[in-house]
Amino acid sequence: MSVYTVGMWLYQNGGGQNIQQTMQAKLRERNINTIVDLNLKDARSQQGKIVCNDTVMEELDLFFSYNAGQQTQYQVYLYQTLNRAIPMINNFDAFALTEDKYQTAHLLNRNGITTPDYHLIHKNDIDGLKLAIRQCGGKVVYKPTEGWGGVGIVKIDNEQALDMLLPFISKTDLRYFYVERFINYDNTDYRIDIVNGQYIGCYGRKAPKDDWKTNITSGGSIFVREPEPEVIELAKKAAAVTGLEIAGVDIIYDREREEYVVLEVNGIPAFATPEQEKIGLNFNNKKVDAIVDLIDSIVTKQTAIKAA
Ligand SMILES: Nc1ncnc2c1ncn2[C@@H]1O[C@H](COP(=O)(O)OP(=O)(O)O)[C@@H](O)[C@H]1O
Ligand SMILES: [Mg+2]
């Protein structure tokens, strides 16, 4: 029986350390050893090898990269390089795609999945921007394409708001505007976790009073939420289109058009924290098991390919 080695880099806060230990134990039962804390920030590369904490990354059977928060360009650069040599979860292409809101929305649309109407416009094309706002019914959300946690997302609901924003924007090194139609919704969303095409769990987030952003970092709160089958199906489709092995799909209900829309697909959806588990978010075990199954199937398939 072969023994495999999988590298891991998993966030340690919010219960991450426990998740990591559980995952290590479950992988061990399947003859899969783990090397943890492989942060590519600490890696150096030369002569065909990326070495991180004395581990030659290319010799791993798989690398599981699951650390929330933004990665530096250096980490992402090595992520991309490494994925040419070994399988990674999430795979680099899907990870890179979903780091970008415009590219994700565009691909989802091309595949028939409803997102908010969106417009990408060159930064000098103010006429185009004004037209886009009109086409969106006068209310848009401006979003940095690579942001997270609701940061930098602003509502523009009249020309004055735009005129106020423009001088500020012209000072930044921005290349384009990305705006979405402002969706009339009840200020709650669904976060659906999908692993390897399988539905794992759901919770809801509610924006704070007088706010329309549901992000926890914007003061949003989490609640237990049972999703309609339609919502699960939509999340599964969205995850499949992005190619993410592990996905957290954010969905809201458009009250005006009476339909669900996919807001974004996240590549590193957090496990439930111990506090969230206490209020009833109980999908962690299912998620760990699905990830362990997936890792197992990928590393054993790899060996079959090498042997053939
Ligand atoms: N088009 C939209 N219409 C209405 N609300 C939106 C729209 N886009 C985003 N929001 C609100 O803003 C929050 C953050 O937007 P999102 O695209 O998920 O970016 P982030 O990566 O910063 O979380 C969402 O959770 C939602 O509450
Ligand atoms: Mg979001």
Image (cartoon, grey):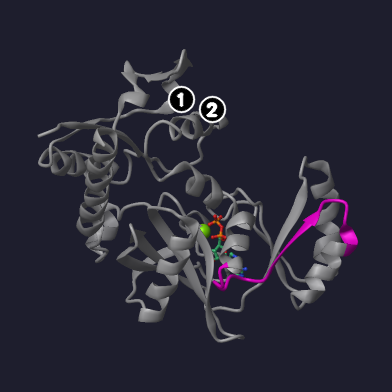
- Picture coordinates of residue 48, whole percent (x, y): 45, 17
Left or right: where 254 falls relative to 87: right
Q: Using a 10 Å C-alpha cutoff, classify the residue at mark 1 as few (fewer than 14 neighbours), some (14 to 19) or many (20 or more).
A: some
Left or right? Give the position of 242 relative to 164: left
Q: Quadrant of residue 141?
A: bottom right
Q: Which mark is residue 308?
A: none
Task: Please say whether residue 45 is visible from this viewpoint.
Answer: yes
Q: Nearer the viewer, residue 254 or 213?
A: 254
x, y percent for residue 41? 46, 25
Q: Is mark 1 within 8 Å of ligand 1?
A: no
- Is 112 covered by the magenta stretch? yes
Percent x, y for residue 23? 20, 43
Q: Earlier in the sequence, mark 2 or mark 1?
A: 1
Outermost residue to the right: 127
Q: Amino acid at mark 1?
A: Lys
Asked if residue 43 is positioned above or below residue 14 in the image, the reply reads above
Query: Which span of residues is magenta-colored?
Result: 111-127
Judge by depth and name the residue closer to the eye, 9 or 294: 294
Element on which disc 2 rests? helix
Identify the residue under disc 2: 74
In this rendering, the answer to whether 68 lies above or below 78 is: below
Look at label 2 and name its amino acid. Tyr
Let me know if residue 278 is in the magenta part: no
Per the rendering, the mark at residue 41 is: 1
- Give yes or no for contact between labels 2 and 1 (Cβ–Cβ under 8 Å): yes
Residue 55 found in image quarter: top left
